[in-house]
Amino acid sequence: MNIFVLVKRTFDTEEKITISGGKIQDDGAEYIINPYDEYAIEEAIQVRDAKGGKVTVVTIGGEDAEKQLRTALAMGADEAVLINTEDDLDELDQYSTALILAEYFKDKEVDLILAGNVAIDGGTGQVGPRVADLLGINYVTTITDLKIDGTSVKIVRDIEGDSEIIETSLPLLVTAQQGLNEPRYPSLPGIMKAKKKPLAELELDDLDIDEDDVEVKVETVEVFLPPKKEAGRILQGELSEQVKELVNLLHSEAKVV
């Protein structure tokens, strides 16, 4: 099977975000593989081990993203591809990202593409479905179980606190939800082997893409941190007095009644 995984480089979940001049400052910040993408990588490896084939991880970004690709290789992926847009594009949105990825895949024999359900930095969950739509293949989002029998696929997907079972077929793109599996940690032998595994680097010219073709459709108007949470207030006195004060506060300060 030809299995591909879409990977994104994101801020470490423990990183404290700072904003200066209307932009997120990343000087000295730690980056990781988007956590939802780790579920996709793990599932790809498990499918390969069960069905045979090859796992290729793909990302878009600059040279710094090579570290996350090497981590995916250390987890057990076979090959990696970096589509380097650092010198060509100042920014990407879901439209441009999906278009670039679809151009990469258009001449590939694809059986299965896995991606994270969402990226923790943007949280739109658009890239995977957009890629599938551009390629004209089936897709299922937020999956928590995946069983493949030949070209037939049986999937369990999360639907807001419940689940549903879907039957579909390859070629297919799925996005991984928490609970699909337990991602493995790279082992020392895996880290050593990753250094020798293929990591190809492509640019937009290699994909016959002009910069104008992937001009972003979304404009960021403003970036700001959420307001600081104010300390809670403890009401004093008899219960009836607390109720009256609470109602008054909800009306006069919170303005919700």
Image (cartoon, grey):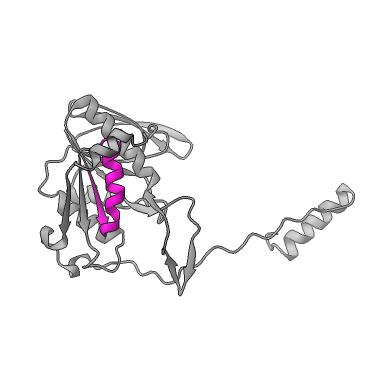
In the visual, does 58 lie left or right of 160?
left
* Image position of 88 with respect to 198: above or below: below
Q: Main secondary structure of the magenta part?
A: helix
Residue 197, position as x, y percentages in the image: 19, 41
Residue 218, position as x, y percentages in the image: 33, 66
Camera-side residue of 87 and 90 = 87
Q: Quadrant of the N terminus?
A: top left
- Residue furthest to the right: 238
* Image position of 91 with respect to 68: above or below: below
The quadrant holding residue 204 is bottom left
Q: Is residue 141 visible?
A: no
Residue under the image location 49 percent in, 65 percent down: 18
Tell me where the magenta segment starts and ends, as one range: 57-77
The quadrant holding residue 64 is bottom left
Residue under the image location 20 percent in, 56 percent down: 83
* Image position of 41 with respect to 239: above or below: above
The quadrant holding residue 30 is bottom left
Camera-side residue of 45 and 219 = 45
Residue under the image location 38 percent in, 43 percent down: 36
